[in-house]
Amino acid sequence: MTDTATTSGSEAMDGRLGRPFLQNPTPAPSQDHIREDIQKKYKHAFVVHAKQRTSCLSRESDNTPSFLGFRNLMVLMLVVSNLRLVLENFKKYGILVTLSGHEYRQHDVLLGWILFLLVPCHLLVAYIIELVAARQAKAAVVRIKKNDNVRARSTSQQREHRTFQLTWTIIAMAHGLNATLNLAIATTVVYYHIHHPGIGTMCELHAVIVWLKACSYALTNRDLRHALLEPTGSPPLPELYKKCPYPNNITLRNLSYFWWAPTLVYQPVYPRTNSIRWDFVLKRLSETAIGVLLIWILSAQYAAPLLQNSLEMVSSLNLGAIVERLLKLSTISLACWLAGFFALFQSFLNALAEVMRFGDREFYSDWWNSSSLRAYWSSWNKPVFHFMRRHIYAPLVGRGCPKVVAQIAVFLFSGILHELLVGVPTHNIIGIDSHASSYCLQPLTHSFSA
């Protein structure tokens, strides 16, 4: 009896001593709890500076802070400062954006529509030329296959190759004449007979696009014909082209698709989507309309009066006032450029690609993150970049031309295109604008050597 009581007492004592199998112990207070207790009791005496620390903007700081708040602050300041300019412009000029302020001569509109409808006819002429060339190529292949003797077939193939070279010279001259007439007629009409710069720009831009497409159509089919006549001596064609081998691609349907496709580089086959999302098309077209409207408002309400007020300063060569006007105009120009870029490359081209079920929609890349001019010029306008690299730079380098000479050729070609698109519609072909724009495009040529 006594032993039992003694054992029970010992077990109870063991429980008080904190044996885990008999009773849960009371947890020891943590440092945070102790600190909270001290703060409750001594509210003015708790420790603030307990360890060595550095300022977050110092080099010695272990963690680099985020600057997202500064970016948001700069955006807010930019919006507020531009709102001030908007209010100042409204108080000074009132509302200048009116439909009656943009007068379109009926003569300009009529000529614009005629050019817009006639320019694509040069693509039809290019199709007829290629159709004749394709029939000649198929007949040459049939004649080569008729020779059972391997040696005779090789001799026949060499003879057909020489005939092909002569034929291609004639075909190339026909394509060159057709493309040159397209650009020459459109440029002459725009420069001498269309006086509205907006209508003239649209007509000249359309003519340049059709000219680039016709050149790409002719050059690509030339290589495809060469691969058909010499399958062993030519490099293998891309796997994608096997879905529509030459000359099955020489059809009006194939050319019509290329005419409307948002690309300047011809391929017999393009990656295609499965269906058309009409809600997507409607959204992109709405964005395009908003972008065009924004450019119109910025040009009429802000750029026009600013330029008008700057004429006297420019004539008097007031350098300080000219610099001040240029800084003001730079903000408007940048806003117009960004609105035009988004409206064209993001909205309109995506809407057109959706209607055409065009799969490759990398019309630009993240040029706003470019660390150099070279990266910028090769990323902000991918359709033009692909054309120049495929049809100008790569063929010249492939034929042994030095890279510097090929870059100069791209440089000159860019200058001529910008002169046509800027100088012709504004009736200001003096070489200065073209040279300046081409000089700015010089970094583009260096991107081809990558």
Image (tube, helix red, strand yellow):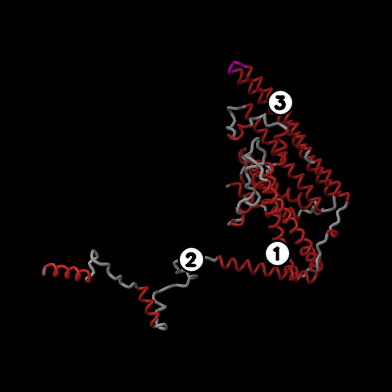
Q: Judge the density around disc 3: few (<14), some (14-19), many (≥20) Cα neighbours within 10 Å.
A: few
Front in this rendered view, residue 413 or 129: 129
Look at 64% across and 36% down and name the residue there: 269
Q: Earlier in the sequence, mark 3 or mark 2?
A: 2
SS class of the residue under badge 3? helix
361 falls in the magenta region? no
Q: Earlier in the sequence, mark 1 or mark 2?
A: 2
Placement of the N terminus among the 4 image quadrants: bottom left
> Between residues 377 and 95, which one lies in front from this camera angle?
95
Which residue carries the number 2 mark? 64
Q: Is most of the magenta stretch helix, strand or loop? A: loop
Q: Answer left or right for 147 relative to 413.
A: left
> Does dot 2 land on a helix, a strand or a loop?
loop
Report the residue marked by disc 3: 135
Residues in magenta? 147-151
Q: Quadrant of residue 224?
A: top right
Res 170 quadrant in image: top right
Label 2: how many Cα within 10 Å (few below 14, some 14–19, many 20+): few
Q: Above or below — where is 25 with respect to 273?
A: below
Q: Which mark is residue 331?
A: 1
Task: Give the amino acid type for the residue marked by disc 2 in the picture.
Answer: Thr
Q: Are marks 1 and 2 in contact (CB under 8 Å)?
A: no
Q: Amino acid at mark 3?
A: Arg
Q: Earlier in the sequence, mark 1 or mark 3?
A: 3
Position in image of residue 430 (x %, y %): 79, 54
Left or right: where 310 falls relative to 345: right
Cα distance in 3D space between marks 1 and 3: 57 Å
- For marks 1 and 2, give the CA distance: 32 Å
